[in-house]
Amino acid sequence: MEEFPPAPGVAGTSLDGTKNFTITAEENAALCKSTGVEPAADGTAHPIYYYIATQVAMGKTVAGVCETCEFDVDDGPMMGSSGVRFTEQLIVGQAYKVTGEILSLVRKKSRKLGVMDVLTYRLRLHPADGGDAVLETDNVWVLPRKELAA
């Protein structure tokens, strides 16, 4: 079995955001239109905002997360999966904040990609004025390690 250096020890790194994210009625309407649905009359936002809001308002950019993992964003991080658990619906006009952390970074060998790191991180979306999370999402990215290819 080939040997390669271990993945950087990044588990536990905070992804807490510093800025709030608000889903505006205009943005929600445009997104709904692009997916062929009407905005909800009750003020709830399209559920895809779980991903948009958490990614935009987390404490690091995509490039910043990659840098934390000692990975060059220009090498092409790939989304592996994203799962979400809602406890409440998202509301148009509500300001939200993000808390979260990197759960793991595991180095593996793949037949297709060669050496790669599998990054798993968790983000939670909370009302900005306090309270329990309205959703929690676990995201998995694949970071191909071309520099470790044999």
Image (spheres, rainbow, N blue to C red):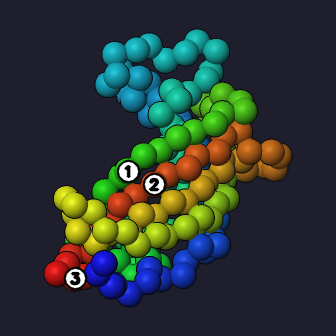
Local SS, label 2: strand
C-alpha separation, residue under disc 3 versus residue under disc 2: 21 Å
> Residue tagged by mark 1?
80
Q: Distance between the Cα atoms at labels 2 and 1? A: 5 Å
Left or right, 129 with respect to 111, comes to: right
Q: How many numbered dots are placed on residues in this image?
A: 3
**89 lies above or below 76:** above
Tell me the kind of residue under disc 2: Val
Label 3 close to label 2 by CB (< 8 Å): no
Vertical side of 75 occupied by 131: above or below: above
Q: In which quarter of the image is residue 92?
A: top right
Q: In which quarter of the image is residue 59?
A: bottom right
Q: Is the Cβ of the residue at disc 2 closer than 8 Å to that at disc 1?
A: yes
Q: Is residue 55 visible?
A: yes
Side of 8 where 94 appears, left or right: right
Reading the image, the residue beneath label 3 is 147
**In percent of the image, x 71 and y 30: which residue is there?**
88
Q: Nearer the viewer, residue 121 or 4?
A: 4
Q: Which of marks 3 and 2 is nearer the N terminus?
A: 2
